[in-house]
Image (cartoon, grey):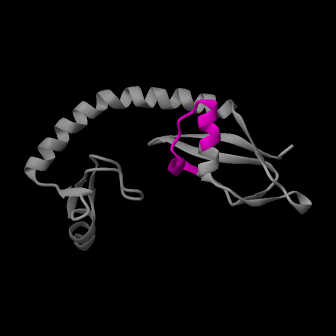
Amino acid sequence: MNIILKQDVKGLGFKHDLVKVRNGYGLNYLIPQGLAVVAGRAALNDRAEAVRQAEFRQEGLRSAATDLAAKLAELTLSLQVRTGENNRIFGTITTLMIAEALQAKGYEIDRRKMAVRGEIRELGTFQVEVELYRDIKAVFNLEVTPEA
């Protein structure tokens, strides 16, 4: 079954993509959830027009994401946390905490677009990957230090 995605679906495709899926997945999940429509003649014509209009907006978003990726690559974000014995921190550093620290620095980044390799449970320097645009990702350093 061919469908047109109405929004990004992780692991399947991006908005306005024409994808082929199994009938059950399309009819029982994607279409009822409002994530896709059947790729009929009218839907394909609507998709073509939407893609033309989106290409103009996409170029601006892509250049902004590239600039932000360059800025983030140079950034070393520092978080101060409470520690116990053996320099282990209380709890875990979450993407929400990282997003709030970035917001304090003036960067508006959605926490759901961040990925931290493993759990951060001790002091040190870690790498955080951020998906800024479809194929543009940035990696910056997170330095976890003890509170003074």
Rendering coords of residue 55 (x, y %): 30, 31
Q: Is residue 50 above or below residue 85?
A: above
Rendering coords of residue 11 (x, y %): 41, 59
Snapshot quadrant of residue 32: bottom left
**Residue closest to the eye, 28 or 148:** 148
Q: Residue at x 44, y 31 (%)?
A: 62
Q: Residue at x 53, y 35 (%)?
A: 108
**Residue closest to the eye, 41 or 120:** 120
Is residue 101 on the magenta stretch? yes
Q: Residue at x 51, y 51 (%)?
A: 112
Q: Quadrant of the C terminus?
A: top right
Q: Is residue 60 left or right of residue 131?
A: left
Is residue 106 on the magenta stretch? yes
Snapshot quadrant of residue 94: bottom right
Q: Residue at x 52, y 30 (%)?
A: 66
Snapshot quadrant of residue 70: top right
**Residue closest to the eye, 33 or 39:** 33
Q: Residue furthest right?
A: 86
- Residue range in magenta is 100-114
- Prevailing secondary structure class for the magenta stretch in the rendered image: helix
Rendering coords of residue 123 (x, y %): 82, 52
Q: Is residue 130 left or right of residue 58?
A: right
Q: Is residue 60 left or right of residue 44?
A: right
